[in-house]
Image: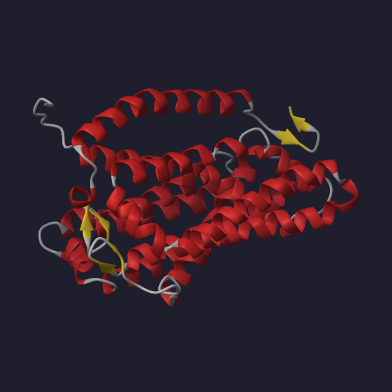
């Protein structure tokens, strides 16, 4: 028999999975964003420079996606059994997009005779993956039909105006991350074009944050209660306030032609949006239907997995930090310098 513990393992695992998903969004977001920006970059040196800026790190970012999906399956099997059948179509589309862009990434260097076609494929794969991720988020947030202990809805329930809005919003946000990443890591005309695109996608991202934020409380009365009930509104009101402050600082940093600040502030906007998502749904894991405690696996299983995660997550963080440190600095068409 396990000894009694004061630690709520379900909450711990909810935060582990939330951390893994956010780490994926941050790290894979900017390299998907670079793919989305390819049509706005000139073929040749500009596109080669953009590709070289993400080449050392892009294929390790999916580690966090695997950790998030695997953690959901192991720690919250009931949620996994409900969510995956409801979202098969966008999740499969996301995986196919990631595979396609990975193939295009490699073949554009090894098949220079068809580089223009591989560039289109790289952008297309990035667009499909980003759009599918946003649609998945919107479909989860709008609610999933549950029958007993399984999914009770139809094949197309995930496709709604709200899920399309979140899909487009994530595409725009990833493009912003990609543009600010290039502002930070490149020079010359690549940086000039990236800075121009960062202004445009910055405005679009803030508009999308506003639209999604305005629509979310109307999806479920519980969401509205978590945001506007007294006195919790005194805390939740700080999130949109910080978004306004962060947006002002972002445009000020771009206007001053800062290098690192626009990227860090764009990440801050993503973090605040993620906090807002948490305010809306926590402690549910299937919004409005199943809580993290109802979906949790037995404590013995959670403890067993937590031991492994406590070892693996620091290792993943260590080699990720090391990789980014080794390949720090500016990059050109021929590589880092």
Q: Is residue 110 left or right of residue 53?
A: right
Q: Is residue 144 above or below residue 52?
A: below
Residue 77 pos. (x, y %): 30, 48
Residue at 25% across, 68% down: 147
Is 108 displayed left or right of 328 in the figure? right
Residue 22 appears left or right of 131: left
Residue 147 in the image: above or below residue 322 = below
- In the rendered image, residue 276, in percent from the top left (x then y), is placed at 31, 56
Residue at the right extreme? 113
**Left or right for 260, reference 191:** left
Most foreground residue, 116 or 150: 150
- Write the residue at 44% across / 55% down: 247
Here the colouring is secondary structure
Compare residues 40 and 155 and report the one nearer the observer. Answer: 155
The quadrant holding residue 40 is bottom right
Q: Position of residue 300 (x, y in %)?
A: 21, 32
List x then y, in percent, for residue 92. Answer: 53, 58
- Quadrant where the N terminus is found in the figure: top left
- Who is closer to the viewer here, 64 or 258? 64
- The answer to whether residue 117 of the structure is visible from this angle is yes
Residue 226, picture quadrant: bottom left
């Amino acid at each position: 028999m396990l000894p009694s513990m004061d630690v709520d393992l379900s909450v711990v695992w909810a935060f582990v999975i939330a951390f893994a998903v956010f780490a994926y969004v941050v790290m894979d977001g900017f390299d998907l964003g670079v793919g989305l920006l390819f049509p706005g970059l000139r073929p040749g040196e500009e596109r080669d420079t953009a590709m070289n800026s993400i080449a050392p790190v892009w294929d390790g970012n999916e580690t966090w996606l695997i950790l998030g999906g695997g953690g959901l399956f192991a720690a919250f099997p009931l949620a996994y059994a409900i969510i995956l059948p409801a979202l098969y179509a966008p999740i499969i589309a996301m995986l196919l997009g990631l595979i396609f862009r990975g193939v295009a990434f490699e073949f554009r260097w090894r098949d220079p005779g068809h580089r223009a076609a591989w560039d289109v494929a790289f952008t297309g794969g990035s667009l499909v993956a980003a759009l599918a991720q946003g649609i998945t988020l919107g479909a989860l947030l709008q609610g999933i039909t549950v029958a007993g202990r399984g999914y009770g809805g139809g094949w197309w329930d995930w496709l709604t105006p709200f899920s399309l809005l979140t899909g487009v919003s994530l595409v725009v946000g990833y493009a912003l991350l990609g543009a600010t990443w290039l502002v930070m890591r490149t020079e010359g005309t690549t940086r000039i074009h990236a800075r121009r695109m960062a202004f445009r996608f910055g405005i679009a991202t803030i508009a999308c944050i506003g639209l999604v934020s305005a629509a979310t409380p109307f999806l479920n009365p519980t969401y509205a209660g978590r945001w506007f009930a007294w006195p919790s509104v005194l805390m939740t009101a700080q999130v949109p306030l910080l978004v306004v402050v962060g947006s002002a600082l972002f445009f000020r940093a771009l206007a001053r032609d800062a290098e690192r600040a626009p990227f860090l502030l764009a990440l801050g906007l993503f973090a605040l949006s993620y906090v807002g998502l948490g305010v809306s749904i926590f402690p549910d894991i299937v919004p409005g239907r199943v809580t993290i405690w109802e979906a949790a696996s037995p404590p013995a299983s959670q403890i067993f997995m937590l031991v492994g995660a406590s070892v693996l997550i620091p290792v993943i963080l260590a080699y990720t930090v090391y990789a980014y440190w080794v390949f720090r600095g500016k990059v050109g068409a021929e590589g880092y310098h």
